[in-house]
Image (cartoon, rainbow, N blue to C red):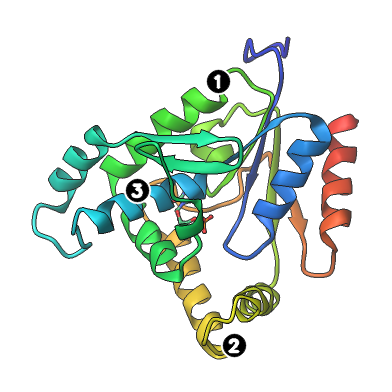
Amino acid sequence: MTAASGRSRPIVAIDGPVGAGKSTVARRLAQALGFAYINTGAMYRAVAIAARNAGITPDDPGLEAKLARLLASIVISFAGDRVLLDGRDVTGELGAPAIGDLASRLSTLAVVRAAMRELQRKAGAAGGVVMEGRDIGTAIFPDAEFKFFLDADVAVRARRRYEELAAKGAAIGYDEVLAQLRERDRRDRGRELAPLKQAPDAVLVDSSHLTIDQVVKLMQDRIAR
Ligand code: DC
């Protein structure tokens, strides 16, 4: 039992900007620890898919009220690594750049953040989880036992993202990827509600010159201490 929280197993929070390697690292770390892995960005992306399917766009008049109704009517769940929206596996659609962009826009709204906060707190309450996102160590579980802020140089993040997209055959240049990434950083860090920032008690890990294995090892060592 961890003293302050009353949880029998700890929560590991990993926050950071897009392209720092959070998902790969968090998944691997969860596996190594025997913990569940929760990707909160995927939840925001599932909301974006639901909004798109419902024909909702960020410029709609009465956007928050429309989203409130939408959020009350959908069910986002996980089946292992798969993300289900109303029971349908939408994992394959989550990675589309347009969905990431819409997720980032909708995530600035209070109604969306409140719904996600409730879902994420329920999912992590028992502990034994590695949860990754933007505000896990600051807003969702400020009392998480372990907090990491995973960052990397913007050019390195853009290069990784570009190579990932190129491998999938996407027709996009490096400069465009870099510009999109800067815009997403600006929005995620600059928003009023739960902006992306390092919690004062989070360990900063700069992955610019580290391999995935090195980052996972560094975190494991920290947790084992
Ligand atoms: O991690 P990601 O790129 O899949 O996240 C998509 C967007 O969702 C991100 O740009 C901002 C939002 N998000 C958030 O606001 N809070 C989180 N904990 C996770 C994601």
Q: What amino acid does circle 1 point to?
A: Ala
Q: Secondary structure at mark 1?
A: loop
Tell me if I can see residue 203 in this picture: no
Q: Nearer the viewer, residue 208 or 193?
A: 208
- Pointers 2 and 1 in contact (CB under 8 A)? no
Q: Is mark 3 within 8 Å of ligand 1?
A: no
Query: Which residue is rendered at x = 64% and y = 22% of the image?
Result: 127
Relative height, residue 75 to residue 213 (above, below): above
Label placed on residue 47? 3
Q: Secondary structure at mark 3?
A: helix
Rendering coords of residue 59 (x, y %):
17, 65
Label placed on residue 174? 2
Mark 1–mark 3 Cα distance, whole angstroms, equals 22 Å
Q: Nearer the viewer, residue 132 or 56?
A: 56
Q: Is mark 2 within 8 Å of ligand 1?
A: no
Mark 1 crowd level (few <14, some 14–19, many ≥20, 10 Å Cα): some
Label placed on residue 125? 1
Mark 3 crowd level (few <14, some 14–19, many ≥20, 10 Å Cα): many
